[in-house]
């Protein structure tokens, strides 16, 4: 289960200056007497974000020079007059770079912790309920990168824009950056920021989502999924963003969009967080194969061999990562008690239609005097017998 090139690698290829500047910012922040584990805004410290904006401006000027035939030197004196209109055209680009800068900085501060979820595990998590209290959501690090290659996750992400599952690039992974921050003043709890991209390296990006969930100390996770910021903070809207890169549309989504069309995607992400802190977690640390491939490039003199090895290397992420749930199988079919004498109690008789029994979580008492708790995952499964496969089989009437 090799980690494909992620959105972090996409930034590395398309906008390397973002990673360079955020790494330098992170280095400066670590030198503070009390270094932060994450930041909420680049306005909270003396950042290099303006340098980043200048680099984006320069890229736009380069494009304008190619389109108009004028040199950059000729266009530069008119930069401040022309740029507002140019920025309006490229609003989605500036919005995306703004999010890239924040997630890359927090990712660097946390040590670039990456978790790659197997397709089978993602399918299980998509069919698991999360009726637990908000405090149970604990990231293993202040910022993490979750990656998914499951078709189910791709479909769930794109459903927020009302797109169906035809024409989607299922070979491109989903990269979701998660950051935990204290809640705003006046709220008891925490805030989980999720920024997700569906993109293919080296230069094709399809969709970007940003959503902030309030994890109130007395809230359930289903309540957190339905966070209504318009009610909680009516004077400070805009925690939800959807950017369709192909159509260059950027939208500040209303809360009802996120907890209807977008609910499935964020439920998977929260279930992934719970899985990492559960009693059944399966993690296998892996080193990036790309580093070794890039090192071998230095010793190759053949251009054709270099090109082939480089193409192979670009398919892999430069990040070391944890492989999550590699041994998790497909969702199983459990027969009823009448057939095998096991399984949960069900009504007598064989089910004629196979159906999904959704997974769920148990926060079970354990330890001395049962004072401790362990989070246990009860996996989803299909209920039914072999007869159900026959009943469910489609027939063509002639």
Image (cartoon, grey):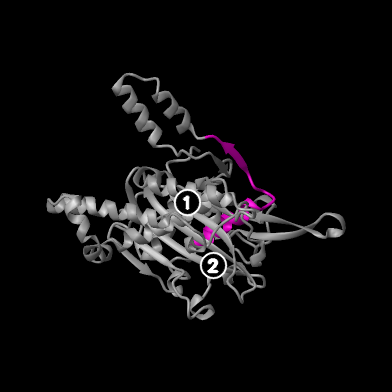
Q: Position of residue 241 (x, y in %)?
A: 41, 66
Q: Position of residue 149 (x, y in %)?
A: 45, 47
Q: Position of residue 130 (x, y in %)?
A: 60, 63
Q: Quadrant of the C terminus?
A: bottom left
Q: Is residue 134 left or right of residue 197?
A: right
Q: Is residue 271 above or below residue 110?
A: below
Tell me how far mark 2 sits from mark 1, CA to CA: 20 Å
Q: Nearer the viewer, residue 105 or 336?
A: 105
Q: Residue furthest right?
A: 369
The region drawn magenta spans: 266-287
Name the residue at 59% across, 49% down. Answer: 31
Q: Is residue 226 magenta?
A: no
Q: Is residue 31 left or right of residue 253?
A: right
Which numbered dot is residue 104?
Answer: 1
Name the residue at 40% across, 59% down. Answer: 98
Q: Is residue 36 above or below residue 241?
A: above
Q: Is residue 246 left or right of residue 97?
A: left
Question: What residue did someone put label 2 on?
Answer: 213
Name the residue at 48% across, 80% down. Answer: 235
Q: Is residue 170 visible?
A: no
């Amino acid at each position: 289960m090799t980690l494909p090139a992620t959105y972090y690698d996409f930034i590395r290829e398309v906008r390397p200056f973002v990673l360079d500047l955020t790494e330098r910012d992170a280095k400066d922040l670590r030198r503070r007497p009390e270094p932060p584990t994450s930041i909420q805004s680049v306005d909270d410290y003396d950042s290099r974000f303006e340098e980043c904006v200048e680099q984006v401006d320069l890229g736009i000027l380069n494009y304008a020079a190619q389109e108009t035939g004028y040199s950059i030197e000729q266009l530069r004196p008119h930069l401040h007059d022309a740029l507002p209109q140019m920025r309006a055209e490229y609003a989605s680009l500036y919005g995306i770079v703004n999010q890239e800068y924040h997630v890359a900085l927090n990712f660097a501060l946390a040590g670039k912790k990456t978790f790659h979820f197997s397709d089978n595990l993602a399918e299980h998590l998509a069919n698991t309920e999360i009726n637990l209290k908000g405090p149970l959501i604990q990231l293993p690090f202040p910022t993490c990168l979750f990656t998914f290659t499951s078709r189910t996750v791709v479909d769930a992400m794109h459903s927020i824009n009302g797109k169906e599952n035809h024409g989607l690039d299922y070979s491109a992974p989903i990269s979701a950056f998660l950051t935990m921050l204290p809640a705003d003043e006046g709220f008891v709890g925490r805030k989980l920021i999720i920024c997700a991209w569906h993109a293919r390296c080296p230069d094709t990006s399809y969709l970007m989502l940003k959503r902030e969930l309030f994890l109130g100390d007395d809230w359930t996770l289903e309540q957190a999924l339905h966070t209504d910021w318009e009610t909680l903070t009516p004077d400070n809207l805009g925690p939800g963003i959807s950017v369709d890169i192909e159509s260059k549309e950027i939208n500040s989504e209303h809360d009802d969009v996120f907890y209807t069309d977008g609910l499935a995607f964020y439920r998977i992400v929260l279930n992934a967080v719970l899985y990492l802190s559960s009693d059944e977690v399966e993690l296998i640390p892996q080193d990036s194969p790309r580093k070794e491939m890039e090192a071998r490039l230095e010793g190759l003199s053949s251009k054709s061999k270099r090109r082939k090895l480089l193409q192979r290397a670009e398919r892999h992420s430069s990040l070391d990562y944890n492989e999550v749930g590699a041994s998790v199988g497909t969702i199983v079919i459990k027969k009823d008690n009448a057939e095998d004498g096991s399984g949960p109690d069900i009504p007598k008789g064989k089910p004629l239609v196979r159906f999904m029994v959704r997974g769920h979580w148990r926060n079970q008492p354990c330890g001395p005097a049962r004072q401790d708790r362990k989070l246990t995952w009860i996996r989803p499964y299909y209920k039914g017998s072999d007869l159900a496969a026959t009943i469910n089989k489609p027939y063509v009437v002639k």
